[in-house]
Amino acid sequence: MLRSCLKRLAIGIGMLIALSMLVFVLLRLTPGDPIDAYIDPSTPLSPAAMADLRDRLGLDQPLPVQYIGWLQQALHGNFGYSIKRLDQPVLTLVLSRIGPTLLLMGSALIMAIVAGIAAGVIGAVRRNSVTDVSLSVLALAGISSPAFLSALLGLYIFAVRLGWLPSGGMLTPGEDFSLGDLLRHLILPSALLAVAQAALIMRYMRASLLEVLNQDYVRTARAKGVVEFWVIVKHALRNALLPVVTVIGSTIGLAIGGAIFIESVFNWPGMGLLLVDAVTTRDYPVIMGAALVIGACVIVVNLLTDIAYAVVDPRIKMG
Amino acid sequence: MLARTERPSPGPLARAFDRFRLNGAALFGVCLAAPMLVFILSYPLWWRFQPNDIDLLAMNSAPNATHWFGTDGVGRDVFARVLEGGRISLMVAAGSTLISALIGFLFGSISAFAGRWADALSMRFVDLVMTLPPVIFLLVLASITGTGILPTITVISLLSWPLLARMVRSRLLELRERDFVTAARGMGAGLPHLLLRHGMPNCIDILVVYATTQVANAILLEAGLSFLGLGIAPPAASWGNMLNAARSTAVLEQYPWQWLFPGAALILAVLAINFIGDGLRDAFDPRAELH
C-alpha cells in the first residue's frame, strides 16, 4: 500500500516536471523573446544594447541551461512579470484569481455531486420508468451541450427574460460586501457549471448501482427482510459509490474547461477569465503561469483521487 | 438450417453494418445528420444570399419570409451564415480528424513496435497530455498560432491524437504476438508493410469510431475557440463566433435569433454525430451479438 502510494507520488512528481518542461518549451515557441516583449517599441533600443541585454539575462544560453534557471526561479515563486498589466508579477495575478475560481468550482462540484448521485439513485431504483428515461435524456443533453451555449441560454432565461438573477460579475459594483449579494451572483454560473458534471456523475451512479443491485448480497439482504430503503442505502449504495469517486475526480478537468467559458460569459473574476484575457492580449508569461498552476492542480487532484480510491477500495491494486 | 450454412457467412464488417442498421438511435443520428450535410454543402446553389452579403435595409430584422433566420447587426443573412459556419466547422472537423488520426495511429503503432523504453516514454507523454484539461492546452496553443482556419485545424489536431494513440498501441501490442505477424516478419516484411497491411485493417474499428467522435469533438472545440475569439475570426462565419456575438447585451436580449440558430445547429450536429458514433461503437463490438 505504502509502496504503491510512493510509486504514484513519484509518477505525479515526474508529470509535474514534464509539465514544466512542456510549458517552458511552448513559452519559447512563442514569437519573439522577452526582450522584444518588454521593450516599448516607441522608445527603441539599439540592436547592440538589445544583444547586451540578452547576454545579461542569459537568453543567449542553450535551452536546457535556460530551463534550469527558469525552474529555479519558478520554484521560488517567480514566474516572471505580466507584459500587459502594468508589469505585475504573474504569481500575484494568479493567486488573486484562485479564490473566486475555487469558490465557483467548489460550489458547482457540491451541487453536481448531490444532484448527480440523487438522480442516479432515483434512475436506478425506478429503472425504465418515465422519471428514469427523462432523467437520462436530460443527462444526455447536459453532456452534449457545450458550456458556452448552456451559459448563454441560462443567462438569457434567468437573467434577461425572467430577471431573477444578476447577469454577471461577482459582486454588485459600488456596494458593500454582503454574503447575500455574493450568493445571488454565484448561483447561476455555478449551477450551469454543475450541469455537465452532474450529468456525468448521474450516468455512472445509475450504471454502478444497477450492477450492485444484481449482486447476491443484495438479494440476501432482501431475503432476510431488510426494508427496501435500507437495502439501497446501506447495502447497495455504499458499494456502488466506489467507482463514482474516480469519476468525480476525473470531472475536475472537465469542470476547469467549463469554468473558462462560464467565467468569460459571466465576467467572473477567476483564473479562466485571466487566462482568456491573457491569450487575447498575447500576455505569454501570464498564459504560461496560469497553465502551469492549473495543470499542477489537475495532476495533484488526480493523484489524490487515485490514492483515495485505493484507500476506500482494498480490492484495487495499484500498478 | 442446412440452407443457411450453405451461404457464406457474412464478414465482420457486414455484420457490423447489420448491427448498425438495427440501432434506432444511430439511424436517428443519420436522419439528422444527412439533411444537414446536404443543406450545408448545397446552399450556395439555391439560397439567395451569400454569407457576407450585406442588406442595409434589413439590419437586425427578425426571421421572415425573405430572411428565414433573420439578419445580424450589419444586415447579413443568418441562415446563410449558419450554413457557411457549418461548412467551416465541417472543414475544420474533417481536417483535424484526418491529421490527428494520422498522428495518433503513427504514434501508437511506433510506440507498440519500438520496444520498452520508447514505449514507456511515449505513453507517459500521452498520459501527460491526457491529464491536462484540453481547453487549457487549446488556449495555450491558440495563443501561439493565432486565429484562422489552418491554425485552428493545427491546434485541434495537436490536441486530439493521444486517446487514439493509446487505443492503437494496445491493439497492436496484442497483434504483434500473433502468428500471422510473426509469419510476415519471418518472410522479411518491414515496418511499413506490417503497419499498412496488418496493423491498419485490424485497427479499422478503432479508427472509424475515433473518427466519428472526433468530428463531434472538433466541432465543439472549434466553436469553443471561436466563441472565445481565438478560432475562426470574423468576418468568416462560424457557429462559435456567431455565438460570441451574443456576449454583447443588445444581441443577447433583443436579437435572440442571431445566436439561437447557430446554437441549435451546433447542438443538433453534435448530437447527431454522437448518436452515430455510439451506434458504430456498438456495431463494431463483437460482444454486442451475445446480448
Image (cartoon, coloured by chain):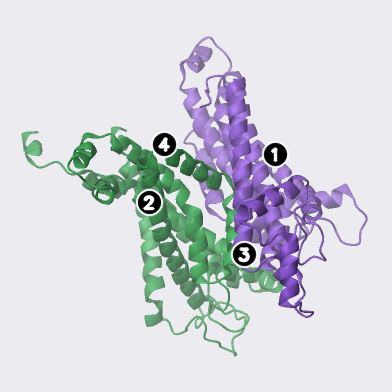
- Secondary element at image label 2: helix
Task: State the hue of chain B.
Answer: green
Work out how far the residue at label 2 is from the one at label 4, CA to CA, in angstroms: 17 Å
Do the residues marked 1 and 4 share a common chain? no
Residue at x 50%, y 59% (from the top left corner)? B156
Q: Chain of mark 2?
A: B
Amino acid at the residue labelled 4: Arg
Q: Quadrant of the N terminus of chain B?
A: top left
Please give left or right for residue A89 compared with residue A13 in the image. right
Residue at x 52%, y 59% (from the top left corner)? B220
Instruction: Measuring from the top left, give residue B169's x and y in whole percent.
Output: 38, 42
Q: Chain of mark 4?
A: B
Do the residues marked 3 and 4 share a common chain? no
Evaluate whether residue B53 shows in this view: yes
- Taking depth in this image into account, of B238 and A161 the one nearest to the observer is B238
Q: Chain of mark 3?
A: A
**How many residues crowd around disc 1 within 10 Å: few (fewer than 14), some, or many (20 or more)?**
some
Q: Chain of mark 1?
A: A
**How many residues crowd around disc 4 within 10 Å: few (fewer than 14), some, or many (20 or more)?**
few
Which residue is under mark 1? A110
- Taking depth in this image into account, of A78 and A258 the one nearest to the observer is A78
Amino acid at the residue labelled 1: Ile
The circle drawn on residue B116 is 4
Work out how far the residue at label 3 is from the one at label 1, CA to CA, in angstroms: 38 Å
User: Furthest residue to the right?
Assistant: A176
Instruction: Measuring from the top left, give residue B170's x and y in whole percent.
Output: 38, 39
The circle drawn on residue B106 is 2
**How many residues crowd around disc 2 within 10 Å: few (fewer than 14), some, or many (20 or more)?**
some
- Shown in purple, the chain is A
